[in-house]
Each structure stands twice: as C-alpha cells, then as structure tokens.
Image: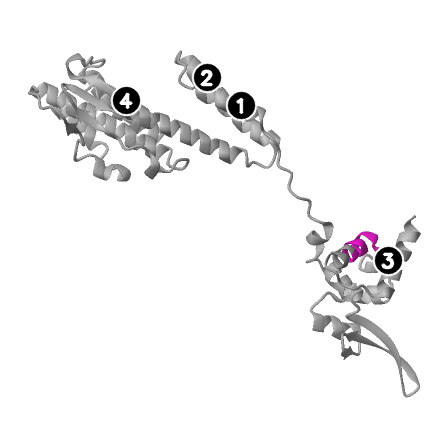
Amino acid sequence: MDFIEIDNINTAYSNNDVYLTIKYILKTEPEPFERWSGISHLIQYISNENLLTYAIELFKEIDFLTNKLDTANITVKNSNDYSDLEKIKINAITHSLILTNEINLKKFSSLIIVSEAPELQLNLNNRRIEHNSTEIGNWIKRNSLKAFVDTTVKLPTFKDQEKAIKKLIQSMSGIAYLNDTNFFLKEIDYLSVIKKNLFEEKLPLVPDFENEKNKMYFKVGLLFAEKKIYSKIIVIDNYKTTKYYYEKEVFDNISKLSKHLNLTRQYINDSFNDANTNHNIFKNLRQLKNIVDYCNNKAITIDNEFLNKYSALIENRQ
C-alpha cells in the first residue's frame, strides 16, 4: 500500500493556482479523458472547501462517475482529531484518488475487464491516507498492453504487426525521454521481445475449386461431369431432333432446360454445341480442372465423355 502523510502534505499549488489551471484545462483541452484526468489530479492540492465543492461538481455530469462522488469511501482504522483544514485536505485527496482511478478504468475499458481490476482501498490510519493506486495502475498498464499485443499479433501480415508494435515503442520511449523517467521500461522490454518473435500465420491453402463452386461455369460443368444434363438425337416421323435432359426430365430445347435449372443459358448452349467462346467450359482447361479436382475430392464419379474431353484438352495444350 502507498500512503500520504497528513502532517507532511506538500501543497504544490495554491488554491488560486488550482482554480486557474482547472479553468485553463476546461477551455483548452478537447480530449475528455485528458481533461478529466488533469482536473482529478489537481483536486488533491485543494484546501478550500468552496473550491473543492466546485471541482467535484464538474464531474457530476459524467455518467460513469454518478455513484462515485457522494461518498469518500475511506476506512478509518485509528481515530484521530483533525482540524477543519485537515478534513478538507483528506476529502480532497480521497476524491482525487477515487476520480483518477475511475477515469483510468473507463479510459482503458475497451482493453481490460474492469470487473477483474483490484478494488481501490482507502484507509485513514494514524494520520496517513493509505491507498493501492499504484497497484491498480500497474494492473491496468499490464492488462491493457497484453490486450494490445493479443490484438496486434492477429493482424494479417508480419509487416502490419511489426509496424503497430514499433509505433507503440516509439511513443512510450518519447514520453519516457521527455519526462526523464523509466516508467515504461518493462513495457518497452516486453514489446521488444514480442517484436523479435513475431510470425505470420500461414492460413491453410483453400483448393481452387472451393473458391469457384458458386460460379456459373462450375455449376453447369458439374452437371456435365455427373451426366445430369445431356442430349440425345432421336427420330420422330423420320425427322432427327435433339432432346435435352436433366436426369430423367426431357426438354425440347436448351432455353427450357436452362430455365428449369435456373442457370445461364449461354454456358449450357455453348458447351453443348462446342462453340468457340468463353462460355464453352470444354475450352477452358483451368475450369475443367477445378471441376475434376472437386469431383475427385468429393468421390463423385465423373462421366467418361467428360473425362475424355478433359484429357484431350490437356494433350492439345502440351
């Protein structure tokens, strides 16, 4: 537990300094969390009851602080007599610690599980305010950084992962240098280790046919491969005519067949008639290979005529 000695409270700022600085922050700081963090930090230096009331009132419009302002949740372990001024200072420090803690938890709530954070403990013991703010701050720092890393290593490429981590290291290093502190030393070491051990996860290759099976050529080609569609020349009254079949159903022309199947007529027509077009699946080796690979993968028996056309196309390309 950290502690603040009641008898050794150093007032870094006068009440007037605190008031003017709060007014300046409210006027110039656009980022909400930075604004409220700055003011909550300043509250600890207040020793005037009216100013303390004014400062606390500023936070009453913030939803997540609604139930945190009406009470100074501090446990009194040993009773002492405190002057009115000391009571104001105790109240100011207590509210500063409570507000700062709640603001930090809210600020990082997208990265941490707030309910798992250590609970803020405040004890008034032998003229000392005991608190565990450092413990909570370190917990937030560790868990938010771990969440950042967990998200970063899921980025699709090694380059993206490395760039995100380098950017954070640079930011932490800059802050540490400007403030002449080692506050982020452990975090920078941790990120450096992660950066050295990044790897790009190789997703299992998806067979070409898995990416193609919803395309029109594939649907038509599969029907040919399974001989679910085919044609026959029959003689009616001494006249030859072509009938088209889908399994056992008979159609007088390709238009009726394609309409029944709800498939594009051009692929069916050009493939039946061996037309020299892009819609004739028997002219496209890659498309035929996707269909053959799919049938082999799914243990589908392929019609011999289809296989012969596939083999002939391979030979012609060699």
Which residue position is annotated with label 2?
174
In the picture, measured across the screen, residue 270 lies left or right of residue 179, that is: right
Tell me where the magenta segment starts and ends, as one range: 283-292
Look at the numbered disc 3 and give the secondary structure of its residue.
helix
Please give the label number shown on residue 24: 4
Alpha carbon separation for disc pair 1 and 4 = 41 Å
Considering only order in the chain, which callout, 4 or 2, is on the residue closer to the N terminus? 4
Look at the numbered disc 1 and give the secondary structure of its residue.
helix
Three-letter code, disc 4: Tyr
Considering only order in the chain, which callout, 1 or 3, is on the residue closer to the N terminus? 1
Alpha carbon separation for disc pair 1 and 2 = 19 Å
Where 318 sits versus 109, above or below?
below
Three-letter code, disc 3: Tyr
Report if residue 66 lies within the magenta region: no
Tell me how the rendering is colored. one colour
Contact between labelled residues 4 and 3, with CB atoms less than 8 Å apart: no
Look at the numbered disc 2 and give the secondary structure of its residue.
helix
| Image quadrant assignment for residue 304 | bottom right
Three-letter code, disc 2: Gly
Where 206 sits versus 193, above or below?
below
* For discs 2 and 4, the disc positioned in front in the rendered view: 2
Report if residue 286 lies within the magenta region: yes
In the picture, measured across the screen, residue 267 lies left or right of residue 305, that is: left
Contact between labelled residues 4 and 1, with CB atoms less than 8 Å apart: no
Considering only order in the chain, which callout, 4 or 3, is on the residue closer to the N terminus? 4
Q: Where's the N terminus, which quadrant?
A: top left
Where does the image place residue 112, in percent across and percent down from the top left?
Answer: 39, 35
Identified at 55% across, 37% down, the residue is: 154
Alpha carbon separation for disc pair 2 and 3 = 64 Å
Please give the label number shown on residue 310: 3
